[in-house]
Amino acid sequence: MSESPDIATLAAALADPARAAMVTRLMDGRARTVTELGAASGLTKPSASEHATKLVAAGLLKADRQGRHKYLALASPEVAHLIEGMMALAGTKPSRLPLPGPRDPAMREARLCYNHLAGALGVQLYESLSTRGFLVHRSNGLDLSPEGRSFCLALGLSTTDLSPTPPPLCRDCLDWSERHSHLGGRLGRLLLARIEAMGWLQRREGSRALTVTPKGRRAFPLAFPQPSLSKDICLTA
């Protein structure tokens, strides 16, 4: 058999419902102890520890020890991108729920996808930047146009923020509830951080949902206006 990526081993690590729940619990970008993950997933500490070891071995989680505690987090943004895409695909299966994704309206409107903005507002941001030509959809991936760079600088990002250094500046991320792309990559993280710094969104303790402040209700639609009914995006060679 020819050599190929070991998809089966990676898939097996997520095939257990308890491990899938643990990984999903870390999609807010925070690190948690084995005990905390076990409690959130309905597992005893020994069982949670066993599952966590398998997830670390598969490269899905990373473990950092501080003092007596070992903290677990998603291994990379690429893992978060994979999990969000799987959540979106899982939601396309027949279900009693009328809508895919979370039931909580706040989660559907604005939530964390690891370190960037997801939900209806995340998709609005992505489509607003796209239709104004700030994001360029090339055949080899997503890029920031010169106009988009000027917009980001005016919003408060720096030239260092927008430098062409790893990880990728822009990337598509399929939204769990909206079934459209939202903005991931370094720019997605930077824009969310800037939006939070301006007081438009606030994090909630113990939840991926983000609170839209009164200031955000006014300012977000001005910075990222809803695109027109035509959402066709032309690919640039």
Image: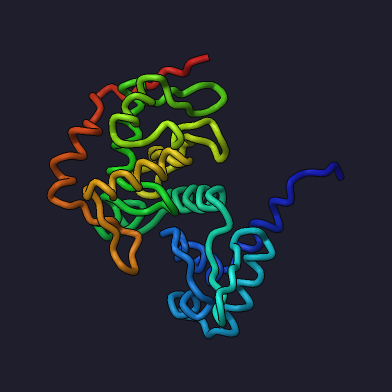
* Location of residue 221 (image quadrant): top left
Instruction: Classify 99 as above or below 170.
Output: below
Residue found at x 37% / y 54%: 112
Residue 135, given in percent of the width and then of the height, sits at 40, 26
Residue 226, given in percent of the width and then of the height, sits at 23, 31
Instruction: Classify 105 as above or below 178.
Output: below
Visible residue check, residue 93: no
Visible residue check, residue 100: yes
Q: Is residue 171 left or right of residue 111?
A: right
Q: Is residue 46 left or right of residue 169?
A: right
Looking at this view, name the residue that lies furthest to the right: 1
Q: How many marks?
A: 0
Instruction: Classify 47 as above or below 147.
Output: below
Quarter of the figure that contains the N terminus: top right
Q: Is residue 173 left or right of residue 100?
A: right
Residue 101, given in percent of the width and then of the height, sits at 36, 54
Front-lying residue, 164 or 92: 164
Front-lying residue, 155 or 75: 155
Residue 206, given in percent of the width and then of the height, sits at 34, 69
